Image: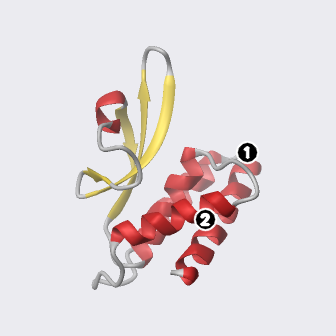
Amino acid sequence: MRRHIIESWLLLLYFDCLLRLGDSDRIYRAVRKSTIRSTAKEECATQLCHAIDLACVFYFKRVLCLHRSAATTVLLRRYGWNAQMVIGAQVFPFQSHAWVEIDGRVVNDKPYITEMFQALERC
């Protein structure tokens, strides 16, 4: 588990650096380019999401939903899960949000998040 937390923390750092460069398109491209490395699901998706949650606790600043979801998607794909990062918005009051789904099921947020936000993009 410690290895997954460290790997998660490093992914958060990577996506935070991309976000600091002011190019959210790079985050999108990095997630799109990540591939499922193994067909066997080596680790439980819940455990991997928990590792990301713990890495967020130990991260040196507040983690935004975009780079948290990007890191979660890449981590899950590394361990054989067909994860998709979803970017959504609601009209009133205007808000945007990012979350991760596996086979249409939300894995890193509340399950009702899809009722609050309209999905705009999946990658």
The image quadrant of residue 46 is bottom left
Q: Nearer the viewer, residue 48 or 72?
A: 48
Marks 2, 1: nearer the viewer: 2
x 63%, y 58%: residue:
57
Image: 31 above or below 106 = below
The kind of residue on which mark 1 rests is Gly
Image: 100 above or below 114 = below
Protein image colouring:
secondary structure
Q: Nearer the viewer, residue 101 or 18?
A: 101
Checking the image for residue 22, the label placed there is: 1
The image quadrant of residue 78 is bottom left
| Structural crowding at the residue carrying mark 2, measured as other residues with C-alpha within 10 Å and reported as few (<14), some (14–19) or many (≥20) | many
Checking the image for residue 55, the label placed there is: 2
Checking the image for residue 70, the label placed there is: none
Q: CA distance from mark 2 to mark 1?
A: 23 Å
- On the image, the x and y values in percent for residue 16 come to 69, 56
**Image quarter (top left, top right, bottom left or bottom right) of the C terminus:** bottom left
The image quadrant of residue 17 is bottom right
The kind of residue on which mark 2 rests is Ala
